[in-house]
Image: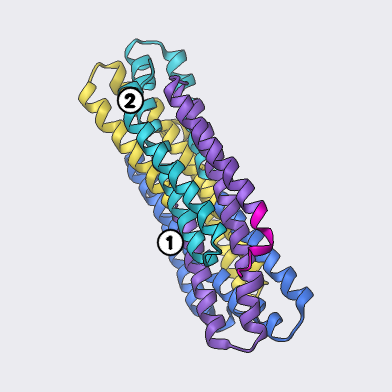
Chain colours: A yellow, B blue, C cyan, D purple
Amino acid sequence: MRGYTMEKDDYLKRLRRIEGQVRGLQRMIDEDTYCIDVLTQVAAVSKALQGVGVQLLDEHLRHCVAGAAASGDDERTESLVHEATKAVERMLRA
Amino acid sequence: MRGYTMEKDDYLKRLRRIEGQVRGLQRMIDEDTYCIDVLTQVAAVSKALQGVGVQLLDEHLRHCVAGAAASGDDERTESLVHEATKAVERMLRA
Amino acid sequence: MRGYTMEKDDYLKRLRRIEGQVRGLQRMIDEDTYCIDVLTQVAAVSKALQGVGVQLLDEHLRHCVAGAAASGDDERTESLVHEATKAVERMLRA
Amino acid sequence: MRGYTMEKDDYLKRLRRIEGQVRGLQRMIDEDTYCIDVLTQVAAVSKALQGVGVQLLDEHLRHCVAGAAASGDDERTESLVHEATKAVERMLRA
């Protein structure tokens, strides 16, 4: 069980749509679509992926971090917050 | 013919790898992988996509923009630069 | 009192350094520095600012979110997590 | 003379406004403003800085890159495009 388990179907649906968008990018390249149009679509797929990332972060905070804090486990809370912050840094650099 | 036509196979290879990574994300969700590990992988896929975007931009500048400028077509150069800048803005917001 | 109150001096020091960097950018423009060099410095200042943002987020999670969760106030925890996620979205779009 | 020389006053005005915003951030920290409100303002300043960066890039492409291409200097064009692409990568990672 994970924080996101209840929303699994939603995540899978979003990721399948993103997979389809990546295949669409291949088709665009294959058909010599104008570079700026491909680039616009690359930005759209990135945005969709970031959306999934933000949603996962939300779930992590809501379930893992808040859960550890509610149970009074300060050390675990500290470590989960640290992981979350590091993950945000990776998203910002991505 | 586009600026990237010569590199088509390279783009398609990178995009197929990204497609595989997106399928890997679905598998991670399906197997209840720890949310932060999924998030790390989301950032990695975003980074790979941005890499494709930067490469497309480079090709656009190298071929379309420089080509128009070399041919002395100032109006077209102006408009291609404007498109490139707008595309960078969309990537920054993605 | 805020989550960051204990680190106030550190934040102020970092922000004063960033202020100095922004003044440095004005000097670069004033002295007709090569555009790419100005751009590199703009990216450095952005990165320093994002670092302050990530640190503030960390403090928010560590103190506000974890504090509300530890006190058993689920509604408040929920709302603080929501605020944090929205803030991350704004940073990603910045 | 740089690509941006004609717009120098505009750049300086924008950078002075950003400097003021950074001083505003110091005031917010000093007055113990709610962390999420500080974070929102950090994102706003980052966005303003990115705006300056995008404008500098636009000028670089419009003047330096297009200028080199128009003069038929392929090697210099190549190298200026490469610099521009690297600068965009740094902005994306910032």
**Quarter-of-image position of residue D4:** bottom right
Eyeballing the image, is C93 above or below A37? above
Answer whether residue D7 is magenta in the image: yes
Image coordinates for residue A86, horizontal then vertical, percent: 33, 42
Kindly indicate the quadrant of the structure image that contains residue C1. Answer: top left
Seen in the image, is A94 located left or right of residue B66? Answer: left
State whether residue B75 appears in this view: yes
Q: What kind of residue is marked 2?
A: Arg
Which residue lies at the image location 62% right of the left edge and 53% below the top edge? D11
Depth check, front residue: B34 or C82: C82
- Residue C34: % across, % down: 52, 67
Left/right of residue D6 with respect to residue C77 in the rendered view: right
Q: Is residue D69 left or right of residue A76?
A: right
Q: Where does the magenta region start and end?
A: D1-9
**Label pair 1/2, CB-CB below 8 angstroms:** no
Quarter of the image with the N terminus of chain B in it: bottom right
Res. C81 visible in picture: no
Identity of the residue drawn at 42% across and 47% down = A91
Tag 1, which secondary structure? helix
Horizontal arrangement in the rendering, residue C61 relative to residue D78 (left or right):
left
Q: Amino acid at mark 1?
A: Gly
The residue carrying pointer 1 sits among few (fewer than 14), some (14 to 19) or many (20 or more) residues within 10 Å by Cα, namely some
Numbered label tally = 2
In this figure, which residue is indicated by the disc labeled 1?
B20
Residue at 38% from the left image edge and 48% from the top image edge: A90
Between A39 and C39, the one lying in front of the other is: C39
The residue that mark 2 highlights is C62
D23 and C57: which one is in front? D23
- Disc number lying in front (1 or 2): 2
